[in-house]
């Protein structure tokens, strides 16, 4: 699908005007998760419910914003974002600060995603979104680290399961599914797992 | 229970059905409908087949999603005349808001239709007769009809009906979500 068609087809599908503006400005095309994949991720969080969300790899905060706004619609909760790069973490914080999130306690932690996961309490996370270091061995480390931290029937989602990074095998080996959707850069798609999942 | 604030209702009449307590009669949970609509939009597919319309509420979600995508074709199949009446009434009421969606409502047994149809759907929603043998036959007939990369979504794969095994046997994944009745959840198969 061309960018032009994507702009037309999905223009009305942003939960906040800041995200629509980011798409129009081309910010998504530099590597942010496609807005249509973000809306599936959002819908899975809203369908399963919960009050604690973790994001591994916030990048510039576009998906963080979608997740925090979804948490707000669920009645509020806690959002933990992990990002290795301080400059991207600052951009994510700047985006979240301008959103109306009175019932969401959010924080963006600068650090290695596995370390941020390990710092969480066991049985505490309802939803996870993974879009950090795009290699299968590290993704498996993240999925393994998440296992004890997840509440029963928590959902784990991840980006870039198809295309250049082809992370699908990590989700499939754990018993999940990898869906292919139209991309706007070198990869895309969505991996989905629901706890409990197979030990990797 | 998922709060109503979590639902981005696609049309006021669908929200009205929730407010009027129509959903617990067996309609797909609105949070599942919302996920199905999001999957349809993400897939980019514009030819949709629904097997089992019941009261037409998921049909309305699918029609509104297609409209947001710029339009498409929605074929819905239902065996019960009274359900067809409900579905057609609701679709007529939302027609003004879905001008670019071509809708066809068929009264047929889904197996018979799948055996003889020339349809090539890119997206399918399966929610009719919930016996495992029936759904297994549906999927066996439906999968070869689907466009490559197309999505099949299924309701009631979580619960006592045994449809989780059917979904998984056809290469699908079962998501367990909060339910309004004895069964619910969402099955997803990508071709």
Image (cartoon, grey):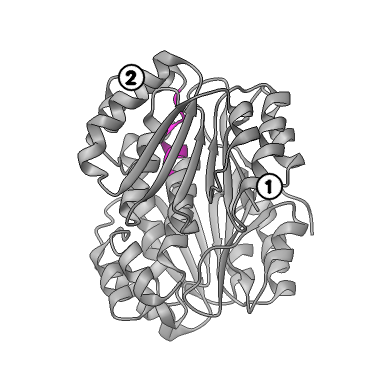
Image quadrant holding the N terminus of chain B, namely top left
Magenta portion: prevailing SS class: helix
Q: Left or right of A38: which side holds A152?
A: right
Q: Left or right of B98: which side holds A56?
A: right
Please tell me how crowded label 1 is: few (under 14), some (14-19), or many (20+) other residues with Cα within 10 Å: few
Query: Is the residue A157 above or below the residue B35 in the image?
Result: below
Q: Quadrant of residue B168?
A: top right
> Which residue is disc 2 drawn over?
B21
Mark 1 in CB contact with mark 2 (< 8 angstroms):
no
> Which residue is disc 1 drawn over?
B144
Determine if residue A44 is in view.
yes
Residue situated in front as seen by the camera: A123 or A127: A127
Chain for disc number 1: B
Q: Left or right of B78: which side holds A73?
A: left
Q: Which residues are magenta?
A: B27-34
Q: Please report whichever mark, 1 or 2, sits nearer to the chain's N-terminal start.
A: 2
Q: Position of residue A137 (x, y in %)?
A: 75, 73
* Pointers 1 and 2 within a single chain: yes
Chain for disc number 2: B
Q: Find numbered disc 2 in the image and state the secondary structure of the residue it sits on.
A: loop
Q: Position of residue B80 (x, y in %)?
A: 47, 16
Query: Is the residue B162 above or below the residue A116 in the image?
Result: above
Residue A43 among magenta residues: no
Determine if residue A76 is in view.
no
Q: Find numbered disc 1 in the image and state the secondary structure of the residue it sits on.
A: helix
| Disc on res. B117 | none
Q: Residue at x 45, y 38 (%)?
A: B75
Query: Is the residue A144 above or below the residue B77 in the image?
Result: below
Q: Position of residue B111 (x, y in %)?
A: 64, 28
């Amino acid at each position: 699908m061309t960018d032009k068609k994507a702009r037309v087809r999905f223009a009305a599908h942003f939960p906040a005007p800041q995200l629509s503006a980011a798409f129009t400005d081309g910010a998504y095309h530099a590597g942010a998760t496609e807005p249509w994949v973000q809306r599936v991720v959002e819908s899975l969080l809203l369908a399963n419910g919960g009050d604690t969300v973790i994001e591994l790899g916030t990048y510039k905060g576009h998906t963080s914003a979608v997740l925090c706004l979804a948490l707000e619609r669920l009645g509020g909760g806690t959002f933990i974002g992990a990002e290795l790069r301080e400059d991207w973490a600052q951009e994510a914080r700047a985006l979240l600060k301008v959103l109306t999130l009175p019932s969401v306690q959010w924080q963006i932690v600068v650090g290695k995603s596995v370390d941020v996961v390990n710092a969480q309490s066991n049985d505490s996370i309802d939803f996870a979104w993974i879009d950090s270091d795009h290699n299968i061995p590290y993704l498996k480390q993240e999925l393994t680290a998440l296992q004890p931290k997840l509440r029963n029937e928590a959902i784990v989602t991840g980006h870039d399961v198809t295309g250049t990074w082809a992370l699908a095998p990590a989700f499939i080996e754990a018993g999940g599914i990898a869906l292919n959707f139209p991309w706007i850069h070198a990869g895309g798609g969505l991996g989905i797992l629901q706890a409990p999942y197979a030990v990797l | 229970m998922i709060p109503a604030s979590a639902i981005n209702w696609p049309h006021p009449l669908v929200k009205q059905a929730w407010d009027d307590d129509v959903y617990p009669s067996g309609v797909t949970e609105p949070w599942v409908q919302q996920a199905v609509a999001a999957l349809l939009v993400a897939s980019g597919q514009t030819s949709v087949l629904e097997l089992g319309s019941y009261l037409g509420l998921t049909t309305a979600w699918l029609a509104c999603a297609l409209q947001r995508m710029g339009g498409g074709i929605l074929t819905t199949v239902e065996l019960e005349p009274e359900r067809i009446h409900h579905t057609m009434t609701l679709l007529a009421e939302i027609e003004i808001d879905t001008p670019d969606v071509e809708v066809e409502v068929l009264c047929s047994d889904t197996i018979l239709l799948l055996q003889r149809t020339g349809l090539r759907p890119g997206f399918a929603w399966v929610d009719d007769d919930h016996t495992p043998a029936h759904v297994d036959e549906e999927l066996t007939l439906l999968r070869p009809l689907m466009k490559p990369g197309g999505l099949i979504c299924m309701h009631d794969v979580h619960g006592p009906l045994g449809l989780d095994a059917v979904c998984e046997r056809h290469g699908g994944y079962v998501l367990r979500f909060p339910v309004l009745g004895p069964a619910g959840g969402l099955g997803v198969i990508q071709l």
